[in-house]
């Protein structure tokens, strides 16, 4: 709560101050995920990653991590479902 109030008072984006994960979707074929911690499970049908506040699970077909760095990753394939756990 205090960090959210500080972000608002300082006019800073909450994701920057709180380290929240961001996901950008391009249709249902591509996702870019920022501020993730690590990859827990990865196959051509499931991607499970941990974040600072929980987990993100992507299910689909022909899933492929196009690239990943310590800060972000890009996932391609047919994205069927995205669940925040």
Image: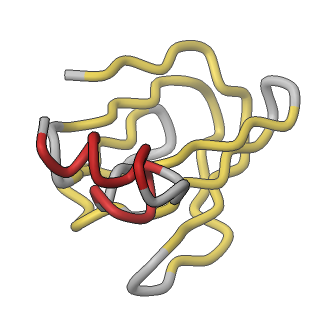
Q: Would you say 13 lies left or right of 75 here?
A: left
- The percent coordinates of residue 7 (x first, y second) are 38, 52
Q: Residue furthest right?
A: 27
Q: Would you say 85 lies left or right of 25 here?
A: left
Look at the picture and state if 45 lies above or below 19.
above
In this figure, which colouring scheme has been used for the structure?
secondary structure
Which residue is found at the position 65% from the left and 54% from the top? 32
- The percent coordinates of residue 41 (x first, y second) are 23, 50
Look at the picture and state if 72 lies above or below 33.
below
Q: Would you say 28 lies left or right of 24 here?
A: right
Residue 65: name its quadrant: bottom right
Which residue is found at the position 73% from the left and 28% from the top? 78
Look at the picture and state if 16 lies above or below 3.
below
Which residue is found at the position 29% from the left and 53% from the top? 6
- The percent coordinates of residue 80 (x first, y second) are 61, 14
Q: Quadrant of the C terminus?
A: top left
Which residue is found at the position 76% from the left and 43% from the top? 30
- The percent coordinates of residue 71 (x first, y second) are 45, 78
The number of numbered discs placed on residues in the rendered structure image is: 0
């Amino acid at each position: 709560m205090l960090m959210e109030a500080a972000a608002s008072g300082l006019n800073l984006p909450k994701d920057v101050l709180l380290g929240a994960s961001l996901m950008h979707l391009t249709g249902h074929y591509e996702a870019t995920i920022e501020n993730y911690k690590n990859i827990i499970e990865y196959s051509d049908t499931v991607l499970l990653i941990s974040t600072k506040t929980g987990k993100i699970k992507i299910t689909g077909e022909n899933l492929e991590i196009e690239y990943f760095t310590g800060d972000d990753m890009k996932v391609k394939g047919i994205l069927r479902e995205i669940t925040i756990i």
